[in-house]
Image (cartoon, rainbow, N blue to C red):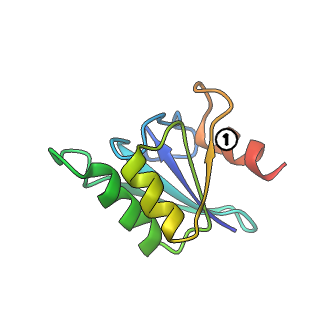
Amino acid sequence: MIVIISSKGDTLNSKVDERFGRAAFFIRIETESMAWQAFENTAVSNAHGAGIAAAQFVIDQQAEVVLSGDFGPNAANALSAAGLRMETFKESDLTVEQAVADLVK
């Protein structure tokens, strides 16, 4: 399964970011192989529409699940319309790797 996680950094050891549209990075992980790739969130500095731009990025990455602390209403509507499953972190002090492990349990 392809999962996109909002992250404060660009590695699996980075802390998760509770913000979706304003997250610093997105980590794309293929859970079967644990192959991953980090992407800087280019929408983070947008004055408006960061959530929608971030949602479009996730959709373009062909993700099946999006994992974040919170989704704004516009981002949630866009992700939902695209058929993506949205999940939230159980804790905010997790690393990306820990959050994925919790998700696939």
Residue drawn at x 37%, y 66% as measured from the top left: 56
Task: Estimate how packed mark 1 is, as few (under 14), some (14 to 19) or many (20 or more) residues with alpha carbons within 10 Å.
Answer: many
Amino acid type of the residue that numbered disc 1 sits on in the rendered structure: Ala
Q: Where's residue 86, x and y in %?
A: 60, 53
Q: Is residue 44 above or below residue 3?
A: above
Q: Is residue 16 found left or right of 20 in the rendered image?
A: right
Most foreground residue, 19 or 97? 19
| Image spot of residue 34 (x, y percent) | 69, 61
Residue at x 69% of width, y 39% of height: 98
Q: Which residue is found at the position 48% from the left and 46% from the top? A: 6
Give the quarter of the figure containing the N terminus: bottom right
In the drawing, does residue 78 fall left or right of residue 105?
A: left
State how many labels appear.
Answer: 1
Q: Is residue 37 above or below residue 5?
A: below
Could you say where residue 95 lies in the image, as x and y percent from the top left? Answer: 60, 35
From this view, report whether residue 63 is shown above or below residue 11. Answer: below
Element on which disc 1 rests = helix
Write down the quadrant of residue 39 in the picture. bottom left
Outermost right residue: 105
Q: Provide the residue designation for mark 1.
A: 99
Residue 49 vs residue 68: left or right?
left
Q: Position of residue 102 (x, y in %)?
A: 76, 42
Q: Nearer the viewer, residue 85 or 25?
A: 85
Quarter of the image for residue 9 reads top left
